[in-house]
Amino acid sequence: MKCLRYPLLIATACLLASCSKNLDEIVPDTQISFDKLTSTNLPLVINGAKLTFTKNNSLYSFYGYQDVMSDDFTSMTFPTWEVNNVSPLDNGLTFVFRQPYATIAMVNMVIRYEQAHAGDTAIRMAAGEAYLLRAYSYQWLADHFGGVPLVYGNEDPKQRGVRNTVAEVEAQVEKDLLKAAELLDDYSNPLTGSRQAAQLLLARLYLNQGKNDAALQLANAVISSGKLALSNNFGDIFKSGVNSTEAVFKLNETPVPTSNMYGMPNLLGPGKEAGASIAGNGNNWVDSAIVKSYESTDVRRAFYVRAKGASIADTVYFLTKYPQENTNSYPLCRYSEAFLIVAEANARKGTVDVTAFNQLRSARKASVKRNSDYASATAFLTEIEAERRREFVGERQRWQDMQRFGKREAWIKSFGAPASHALLPIPSREFSINPYLEQIPDYSK
């Protein structure tokens, strides 16, 4: 069986690596055995888990898939994703499905170690990040595939996992995030897990579940922590080498010293139509309605370029907020989300309160609003949805937003696809490995 290597930590003098012999299976294993773990090497395993999620600098190639499926982008690069009719044979599904499981396999060892050494303060931060990464990985899988097998690293390797329900997966996500919030320190930099990152991801989960009081409480806790701050330097959020206090938690890929033409700039940029040194394939562009909705003073408006599409005669808008760098960076959660969760959770409870909404808009140099500007909480929700599109375009938030705002099912059906295609099919080859899996309805194996 093919052996894949995942670097755990690249330093000036060492490279510790983990080799998984069974990454093709639903329950991966690694050559770093549980009995070899120590409080000293746990951080190495955590770094390896992060790099595993971005394996071979490929995260950009599937980080944006759900955005392509949404109404934020038009794509000629991924035509079946564009029309919400992805084949189970699509090779891209393999990365979406397996890389989170590879990360889970690594952090499961850390979590088992923490459970066996409860109270050891030396491992608290590493264990907290393990719970945080496992929660994010399972939420990623649930967002894309619905119910998936839950694995903890102590299963019989001869067994094959059956799919847990979405409710069971999200219950595990909630449990892991609560544990992460308990173990982790307050925010210090975006490359390290923090209490605020766990709270914000949990607030997102609760908002998507309709638990508005719980979402409101956690989002307010993130804001009132005093550990983060909104900034006018919007572009800094997405720079790998800048510790912007708006980037609560992010993953960096390994550097590519010879080129700054990869990552999200390659996926979303205009490419040579805008200039020889501009990254991008020119085939994935933004809904012009989003760009036109910014006020002239809004600092976010500057992160688009209008250029001719590579395969079309039209001039369209391309997103450029991901900078061209040798190291690409991907925010998993951002401080601004807390403000929009507060506004939305209140509105869903029937209250129009523009306080948090205006704090974000002021930081973006956009006009502020009054409560009286909105005839009802429903009208305010419409404005919040538009603000979320302006703020998070290209950050894989829109697909879940469309569900929450009642837009997703009609969007999918507009392409002639069934509503069940809100979820992706399990990759076909997984069924030959694990016959106990069940496919999403309306897809073949």
Image (cartoon, rainbow, N blue to C red):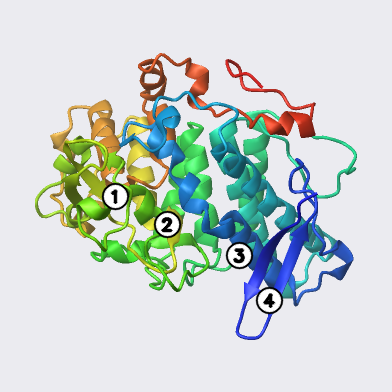
Q: Secondary structure at mark 3?
A: loop
How far, Cα to Cα, is label 3 from label 1? 26 Å
Q: Nearer the N terminus, badge 1 or badge 2?
A: 2
- The nearer-to-camera label among 3 and 2 is 2
Residue type indicated by callout 2: Gly
- Crowding at dot 2, Cα within 10 Å, few <14 / some 14-19 / many 20+, comes out as many
Q: Secondary structure at mark 1?
A: helix
Residue under numbered circle 3: 184
Is residue 214 at all visible to an observer of this figure?
A: no
Residue type indicated by callout 3: Leu
Residue under numbered circle 1: 356
How far, Cα to Cα, is label 3 from label 4? 26 Å
Residue under numbered circle 2: 263
How far, Cα to Cα, is label 3 from label 2? 29 Å
Residue at image point 27% right, 55% down: 320
**Quadrant where the C terminus is found in the figure:** top right
Q: Is residue 121 left or right of residue 67?
A: right
Q: Decide which of 96, 170 is in the foreground and name it.
A: 96
- Crowding at dot 4, Cα within 10 Å, few <14 / some 14-19 / many 20+, comes out as few
